[in-house]
Image: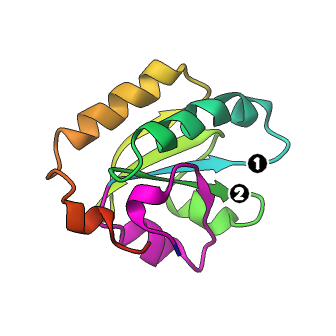
Amino acid sequence: MAKLKEIRHPRPVTANEWRSKVLGAPVPVLVDLWAEWCAPCHAIAPHLNRIAAEYAGRVLVYKLDVDKYPEIAMQYGVQSIPTVLFFYKGQIKDAVVGAAPYQVFRQKVENLLAQVPEVSEEMADLEV
């Protein structure tokens, strides 16, 4: 585990961790539903790495391999990858389907952060 404010890169998430790490997260969460063989998934990876670093302490970024955990993709009606889902308090607030430029992800994160309370110093020190 690491402190929220110290997480500066996307982390893998499993189906068993989904409820606690994604749905139960205290801050907004981006989940990249991807597969190793998917070229567009690799194309957006640098954008999500940058989002994770720039918004460390305010958002979490996870990666879910749909080949390993297809039940999660089916649960959310994901039919195409990459799909990035934006969650807050267990609810999907936005999504990006397909490869998109960095600015699209950044704007969606900014829009989401504008709707949620500011992350307190105590929350940024939480172990997640």
Colouring method of the image: rainbow
Q: Is residue 75 above or below residue 105?
A: below
Secondary structure beneath label 1: loop
Residue beneath the point at 43% across and 39% down: 95
| 1 and 2 marks in contact (CB < 8 Å) | yes
Residue beneath the point at 60% across and 66% down: 13
Image check: 36 left or right of 78? right
Q: Is residue 101 above or below residue 95?
A: above
For the residue pair 56 and 94, the one nearer the viewer reads as 56
Q: Amino acid at mark 2?
A: Asp
- Residue 48 placement (x, y as % from top left): 56, 38
Residue beneath the point at 76% across and 65% down: 68
Q: Which residue corresponds to mark 2?
A: 65
Residue beneath the point at 64% across and 39% down: 82
- Residue 72 placement (x, y as % from top left): 58, 65
Q: Is residue 107 above or below residue 78?
A: above
Q: Amino acid at mark 1?
A: Ala
Where, quadrant-wise, is the C terminus in this rendering? bottom left
Marks counted in the figure total 2
- Residue 19 placement (x, y as % from top left): 45, 76
- Residue 12 inside the magenta-drawn segment: yes
Q: Which residue corresponds to mark 1?
A: 35
- Start-end of magenta stretch: 2-27
Secondary structure beneath label 2: strand
